[in-house]
């Protein structure tokens, strides 16, 4: 079992990447992540940009581990629709992201004068929305979250380890904790606007 901030997760991550399934396309990634069940799903993503039809819904009793090849822009998961969360967590024991970059939107210009009248950057883009009713452990390790919010609306523990939040002026905040039974821990991370 995995101990995180006083909570014991029920499903352990495979000890090596030999136990991970390699997903090379956006369709494979979405299919593997959205699989339901009580077991552990461990997915490794090679370098590259993966634009996902979102939201990618996590609704399982088991755990899911999604690992990339490195956060220095090697493996990027990008929302196809910035009006929807990239990942929507409804239920899981553990959701673990590592060595990834998550993009709520690729919109890159926060200057309102660069948009047609009545339009502007999407300030509501969400990289992850926790909308669960039972506790979930969400871990982001060695990740970058760009132009999107971690929106915590459900109970559980959220742990960021060496994870940078880069709103790029396109989000009002990097993390929004909006549930009385949610714990938030950030270790050695960075926040930039």
Image (cartoon, rainbow, N blue to C red):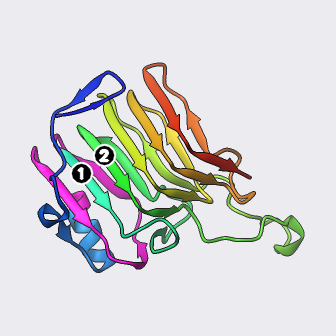
Q: Is residue 31 above or below residue 159?
A: below
Q: Secondary structure at mark 2?
A: strand
Decide if residue 14 is in sight here. yes
The residue sitting at 56% across, 64% down in the picture is 82
Q: Position of residue 1 (x, y in %)?
A: 16, 34
Residue 36 visible (yes or no): no
Secondary structure of residue under mark 1: strand
Q: Earlier in the sequence, mark 2 or mark 1?
A: 1
Left or right: 128, with 22 as reference point:
right
> Mark 1 highlights which residue?
64
Question: According to the image, label 2 marks what residue?
Answer: 95
Question: Which one is nearer the viewer's eye here, 177 or 141?
Answer: 141
Residue 80 falls within the magenta-colored stretch: no
The crowding category of the residue bearing disc 1, from other C-alpha atoms within 10 Å (few below 14, some 14 to 19, many at least 20), is many
In the figure, 62 relative to 116: above or below?
A: above
**Magenta-drawn segment:** 33-62
Q: Please state the horizontal and vertical placement of residue 182, each as a whole percent of the image.
A: 44, 25
The residue under the point 33% across, 35% down is 137
Q: Position of residue 33 (x, y in %)?
A: 25, 59
- Few, some or many residues within 10 Å of mark 2 (<14, 14–19, 20+): many
Q: Position of residue 60 (x, y in %)?
A: 19, 45
- Mark 2 and mark 1 residues within 8 Å of each other at the beta carbon: yes
Q: CA distance from mark 2 to mark 1?
A: 5 Å
**Frontmost residue, 112 versus 169:** 169
Q: State the residue at coordinates (49%, 30%).
A: 184
Tell me the quarter of the picture where residue 25 sits: bottom left
Figure quadrant of residue 8: top left
């Amino acid at each position: 079992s995995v101990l995180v901030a006083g909570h014991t997760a029920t499903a352990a991550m495979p000890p090596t990447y030999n136990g991970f399934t390699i997903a090379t396309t956006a369709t494979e990634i979405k299919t593997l992540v959205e699989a339901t069940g009580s077991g552990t799903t461990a997915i490794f993503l090679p370098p590259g940009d993966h634009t996902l039809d979102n939201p990618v819904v996590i609704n399982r009793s088991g755990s899911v581990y999604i690992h990339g090849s490195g956060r220095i822009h090697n493996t990027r998961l990008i929302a196809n629709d910035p009006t929807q969360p990239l990942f929507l967590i409804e239920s899981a024991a553990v959701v673990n992201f590592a060595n990834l970059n998550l993009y709520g939107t690729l919109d890159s210009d926060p200057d309102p004068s660069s948009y047609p009248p009545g339009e502007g950057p999407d300030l509501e883009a969400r990289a992850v929305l926790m909308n669960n009713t039972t506790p979930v452990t969400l871990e982001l390790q060695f990740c970058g979250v760009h132009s999107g919010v971690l929106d915590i609306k459900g109970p559980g523990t959220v742990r960021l380890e060496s994870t940078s939040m880069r709103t790029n002026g396109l989000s009002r905040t990097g993390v929004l904790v909006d549930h009385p039974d949610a714990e938030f821990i950030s270790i050695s991370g960075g926040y930039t606007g």
